Amino acid sequence: MDIGVLGATGPAGRAMVLRLASVGFDVAVGSRSAARAAETCDELLAEFPDHDLSIRSGDNGEAADCELVIIATPWEAAPEVASSVARHLNRKVVICMSNALARVAGEFQPLVPPRGSVSANVQAMVPGAYVVAAMHHVPAVELGAIEDEVHSDVLICSDHPWAVESVSRIVEKIPGARPLDAGRLSNATAIEAFTAVMLQLNTRYKTRVAVRFIGIDD
């Protein structure tokens, strides 16, 4: 599968590109700036010269031409970026992994964007796409450490069940990750907001927590 990552020059996007390429996907590094995307692509390939990573670069429009698209931009930019490439996204699965968060007085707090979540806002901007909320709780550091397993459940929600299945098959290829169907896209509100709790735990206990649910058979 050919996967495009919009906002791939930031920490989350870079990590997503690396992890997907490491498990055999062809990945396009997307950015508003094609030059910046090319620079990021070169850096990632140079970082792991012993891995056969299928990574190429382009602007967001070129990345959005892929079979499946991931939005990994900061949350404020996600709806605008999705809208700017809307004509490329019709009838495609679009994963939104952005969280609306702010740091206030040293603590992380969730924000409530229009329509309750970044993912729902993106769906409104690209009504012809099949938006899926996923990958919110996997830290970029762990995601990009392709020599190691991820060790995390991945909550996935969408109003399109077959899109959840498609994204679940991708997550299953990531060592240590377990996809869980978390229901309709309205649940993205809680999923995105819980990221603030995880970041606060990381800060307080100087660690990186992961989400694991018991009581669900593999």
Image (cartoon, rainbow, N blue to C red):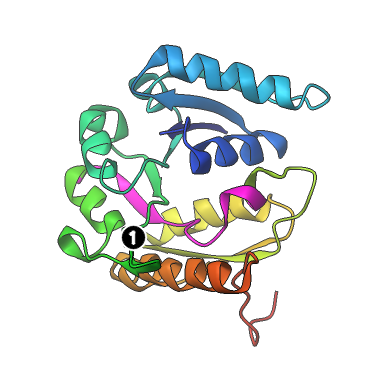
Q: In the picture provided, is 194 more to the left or to the right than 57?
A: left
Does residue 54 show up? no
Query: Looking at the rendering, in which quadrant would you find the C terminus?
Result: bottom right
Q: Is residue 119 above or below residue 71?
A: below
Residue neighbourhood size for the residue with mark 1, other residues' Cα within 10 Å, grouped as few (<14), some (14–19), many (≥20): many
Q: Residues in magenta?
A: 127-142
* Residue drawn at x 57%, y 68% as measured from the top left: 202
* Residue drawn at x 26%, y 46% as measured from the top left: 76
Numbered-mark total: 1
Outermost residue toward the bottom in this view:
215
* Residue drawn at x 71%, y 63% as measured from the top left: 151
Query: Looking at the rendering, in which quadrant would you find the N terminus?
Result: top right
Q: Is residue 95 above or below residue 181?
A: above
Question: Which residue is label 1 attached to?
Answer: 101
Q: In the picture provided, is 139 more to the left or to the right than 186?
A: right
The question of residue 113 being in magenta is answered with: no
* Residue drawn at x 57%, y 55% as measured from the top left: 139
Does residue 152 show up? yes
Spot occupied by residue 181 in the image (x, y as percentages of width and height) = 49, 69
Q: Nearer the viewer, residue 103 or 22?
A: 103
